Image: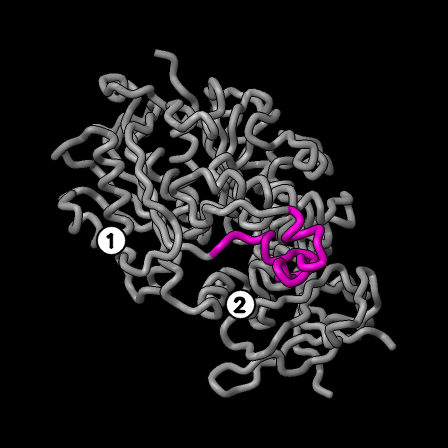
Amino acid sequence: MREIAIVAYKCTKCGRIHYPFHDRCLACKGREFETIKPQGNARLLTFTRIYNLPWGFDQRFLTIGVAEFENGVRAMGQINVDEDFLLTSGMAVKASWEPVRIQAGENVYGLIYSPES
Amino acid sequence: MEINLHARDVAVIGVGMIPFGRRDEDSLMDMLAYASLKALDDAGLGDKSVDAVYVGNMGGGILQHQTAIASSLVDRLSLLPAAAETVENGPASGGSAVKNGLLAVASGYYDYVLVVGGEKMREVTGWRATDFIATMTHPQAEYIYGVTLPGMAGMFTRLYMEKYGVTREQLITVALKNQEMGALNPYAHVEMALSREGIFDSPHAVVNNPPLADPLHLYDACPVSDGAAALVLCPLEMARKINKPPVVIAGFGQATDTQTLQERDDPTDLKAVTLAAQGAFEMAKLTPGEIHVAELHDAFTILEIAESEHVGFFKKGEGGKAALAGKTRFGGQIPINVSGGLKARGHPVGATGVAQVVDIVFQLRHELPKNRQVKNAENGLTVNFGGFGNNVLAFVLRRVKQ
């Protein structure tokens, strides 16, 4: 399994965690950041199942959500569940790093969340 | 030229709009020109030119493969040598164009300014149009996953429902109200009222109104539209010479927020809406309770409810109940989206912020038929919502007593 390639940024001055990158801290305007990786399991904050997909997605629907990892990193990802799977906010999910779309014939990797079994 | 840095009151002396919808026969430039000519004629400028033109457009570079749109428009309209700029700010491009025109006249630098917003979205497939709108999301943290604006709205709706108890019935009430009003508006894309039974109550509703991005359904979303709208602005003292009830842009506010929803401390808090509205109210020296009619950016039904709370019409968590109780209907406590809103008038993204102002000017001039005219309306509000609430403009308009 590939390592999750997301890097988040923790402000060295106030500790606020950012993802994606900002040149200045959203809270204190600090410019120094420690890079951190999403750690541990994650909890689903919100999600949706999209049926009207954009160009590049030749499928019937796509389930997408935002999850928060144990170390406070929040990130969007696709959710790997069947259409009839009952997702709930706060549900524990496991993250993996897998192809999320194809662009110019190449796989683009991103976060895939799966419910904890 | 000596620049007068003392702000002047700015009036809207001309408005123009073309019917929104699917306009296969017209190019983007055709639509911008038609709306502009209507506004110039409404202003009674005759063969006179304007000093500057601001064009709100989001997607000409992507959808029509055309750039420098404002330069092309001034040439087509023979407004040379007027200054001209295209203003791109996502779905708030129209509002930003209005703001640029307002500041240019208020500063004293220009006297007559044409503001026009337009978009041609229906000449590409739904797939392409959805992808075009999604390009405003963060490229690495959001876009790559295939998230769409309905998808963002779906996730926001779920959070709002969980925090404030907004119901599907409340959302549907907004859709029914706005399409009922759109059916009366000759400029609306969707001139068709909906039945509650058809989209909510009956067993067939699941077929008629399928999920779009759950918990949102098809009829919770605005259509993808072609269209254009335009305004002519000038200082109030010059507007008084024109035989029309002067309407001034009494206040404006703009604010931004994080690009991604996930980085907001409370993703249900639309801070940019609150700040933009507060700025507009403070400048106009008015309160939300003094507004008689509002055009809010209802790209999705949840947004009308959330914005009605964030601008201060209702407390947080009360907007959905107010909609269900009829308080936001024509004839209610605060009529919202009497034009039909984005939901029915349509949402040609670059046009919307301008069209909202045009619709409020119609109201404040008392020009509309009885079934849409808010009686004795003197103050109006518009909210143009860019991104997913990360760049918002609000305008307060006031009818000037003569």
Which percent across, then down, holds residue B64?
32, 64
Q: Are marks 2 and 1 on the same chain?
A: yes
> Picture quarter containing residue B119?
bottom left
Quickly name the residue at label 1. B30
In which quadrant will I find the C terminus of chain B?
top left
Q: Is residue B360 left or right of residue A81?
A: left
Q: Is residue B306 visible?
A: no
Please tell me which residue is depicted at 39% across the width and 62% down the height of the picture: B122
Q: Is residue A117 left or right of residue B271?
A: right
In depth, the one of B217 and B11 nearer the eye is B217
Gap in angstroms between the C-alphas marked 2 and 1: 32 Å
Q: Which residues are magenta?
A: B196-223
> Picture quarter containing residue B311?
top right
Which chain does the numbered disc 1 sit on? B
Please tell me which residue is depicted at 25% across the width and 31% down the height of the picture: B42
* B222 inside magenta stretch: yes
Amino acid at dot 1? Asp
Please tell me which residue is depicted at 39% across the width and 60% down the height of the picture: B121
Q: Which mark is residue B139?
A: 2
